Image (cartoon, rainbow, N blue to C red):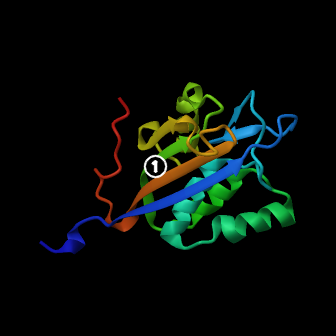
Amino acid sequence: MSLKNFPLFRTGIGQDSHRFLPADSSKPCMIGGIIFEGVPGLDADSDGDVVYHALCNAISSLTGAPILGRIAVELCRKDGITDSQVYLEKALQTLQGQKIVHIAFTIEGKRPRLQEKIDQVKRKVASVCSLHEKQVGLTVTSGDGLTDFGCGEGLQCFCVLTTVEAMALPDQIGHIDKK
C-alpha cells in the first residue's frame, strides 16, 4: 500500500510564559480567554494570555508564520489590539489545508487555582478553534516551588497541536462522538 493513501498528520509545539504584574495592577489575568479573579494580570504588551500565545507558537511551528514575532506585534503596536484571541484567529488562518484534530496544554503556576476553570478554558479554546471540547486537553501543575512559576511569580504554558492535511482527511478522522 502506498503512503499516499494515509492521512498526513503534523505535530506542532509551542510555549509561552509571562511574569505577573504587581499586586496593585488593574489589568485582568486572562488565561485561555477566561478572566481569573484574585491575581494580577500578566506582564505583556498584550493581555498576556499564555494559553493562546502557546497555541499561536504551536501553529507557527507548523506554518512558519511569525504570529507572535511579527503579526501580533503589529496588531498591538500599530492598531492597539491587545486581545490575544485576535492573534489566535490570525494564526488559525495560516493553517491552510490543515485541520486541527487535537490540542493539548499544560500550565505551570502556583497561582491562580486553575483547576476550578479548566472546563471553561477548554470550552473557550474549542469554540475559538471550531473544535469539540473533547479535542482539547488541559492539565495544570503548581510546580511545587521548583521554578519561578512554581513560586507564584508567573505562568508558563506548553502546547502540543496535532493537525491532519484536509485533502487527506477521510470522513472518520477528526470525527468526535459528542455523546
Q: Is residue 26 left or right of residue 31?
A: right
Q: Which residue is mark 1?
A: 103
Q: Is residue 157 left or right of residue 19?
A: left
User: Which residue is depicted at the point 52% across and 51% down?
Assistant: 158
Instruction: Please say if 166 is above or below 1.
Output: above
User: Which residue is depicted at the point 30% across and 53% down?
Assistant: 171
Name of the residue lying farthest toward the front? 146
User: Which residue is depicted at the point 60% across and 62% down?
Assistant: 91
Label 1 Cα neighbours within 10 Å, binned few <14 / some 14-19 / many ≥20:
many
Q: Quadrant of the C terminus?
A: top left
Horizontal and vertical percent for residue 65? 59, 72
Residue 98 visible in rendering: yes
Q: Quadrant of the N terminus?
A: bottom left
User: Which residue is depicted at the point 43% across and 58% down?
Assistant: 99
Instruction: Please say if 87 is above or below 67.
Output: above
Horizontal and vertical percent for residue 78? 85, 66
Q: Is residue 89 left or right of residue 161?
A: right
Residue 165 visible in rendering: no
Type of the residue with mark 1: Ile
Horizontal and vertical percent for residue 167? 36, 67
